[in-house]
Image (cartoon, rainbow, N blue to C red):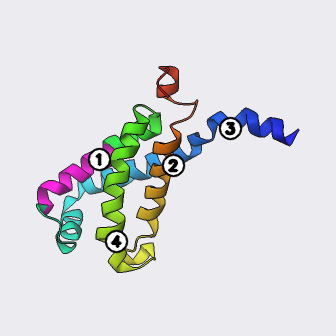
């Protein structure tokens, strides 16, 4: 009986992952969009080039990527872009601060990276715009 239930819900397994990652990125992107100076300082400290314009690229990735993942629309493409940015965010920006998120560590970026990687590899699942369009 339990196996039948698992099989019945398996196509929807990515929905909670998409919801969590999408919502987290939307909130993060909105926070950065409404107060970009902190992100610009962080990118400058990480010695990333062109920190000010890069700030707005990151805001776009977070807002658009978060929305696309949440909806499951062009989800694999969005997840691939997120994997690229979150790899930089995790290993270049936050790794030097150690693990704890409350100290600017890589805890949260790593979790988002792993989630985006799972979405890229596994697709958005049945409860998605991509699935409705037949593109999942």
Q: Which of marks 4 and 2 is in front?
A: 2
Mark found first going from the N terminus, 3 or 1: 3
Q: Which of marks 2 and 1 is in front?
A: 2
Q: Distance between the residues labelled 2 and 3?
A: 14 Å
**Badge 3 vs badge 1, beta-carbon distance below 8 Å:** no
**Badge 2 vs badge 1, beta-carbon distance below 8 Å:** no
The residue at which mark 3 appears reads as 10
Residue 22 disc label = none
Q: Which residue lies furthest to the front in this view?
A: 121
**Badge 2 vs badge 3, beta-carbon distance below 8 Å:** no
Q: In this view, does 111 lie to the left or right of 13?
A: left
The residue at which mark 4 appears reads as 94
At x 12%, y 59%, the residue is 52
Dominant secondary structure, magenta: helix
Q: Report the magenta residues as a range.
A: 51-63
Q: How far apart are marks 3 and 1 (CA)?
A: 29 Å
Mark found first going from the N terminus, 4 or 2: 4
The residue at which mark 2 appears reads as 118
Q: Does the magenta stretch include residue 21?
A: no
Mark found first going from the N terminus, 1 or 4: 1
Residue 61 disc label = 1
Q: Is residue 112 above or below residue 7?
A: below
């Amino acid at each position: 009986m339990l196996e039948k239930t698992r099989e019945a819900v398996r196509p929807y397994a990515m929905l909670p992952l998409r919801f969590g990652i999408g919502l987290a990125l939307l909130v993060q992107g909105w926070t950065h969009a409404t107060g970009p100076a902190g992100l610009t300082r962080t990118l400058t400290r990480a010695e990333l080039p062109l920190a000010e314009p890069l700030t707005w690229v990151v805001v776009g990735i977070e807002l658009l990527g978060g929305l696309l993942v949440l909806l499951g629309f062009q989800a694999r493409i969005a997840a691939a872009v997120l994997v690229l940015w979150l790899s930089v965010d995790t290993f270049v920006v936050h790794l030097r601060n150690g693990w704890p998120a409350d100290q600017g560590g890589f805890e949260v970026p790593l979790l988002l990276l792993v989630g985006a990687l799972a979405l890229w590899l596994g697709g958005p699942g049945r409860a998605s715009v991509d699935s409705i369009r037949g593109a999942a």
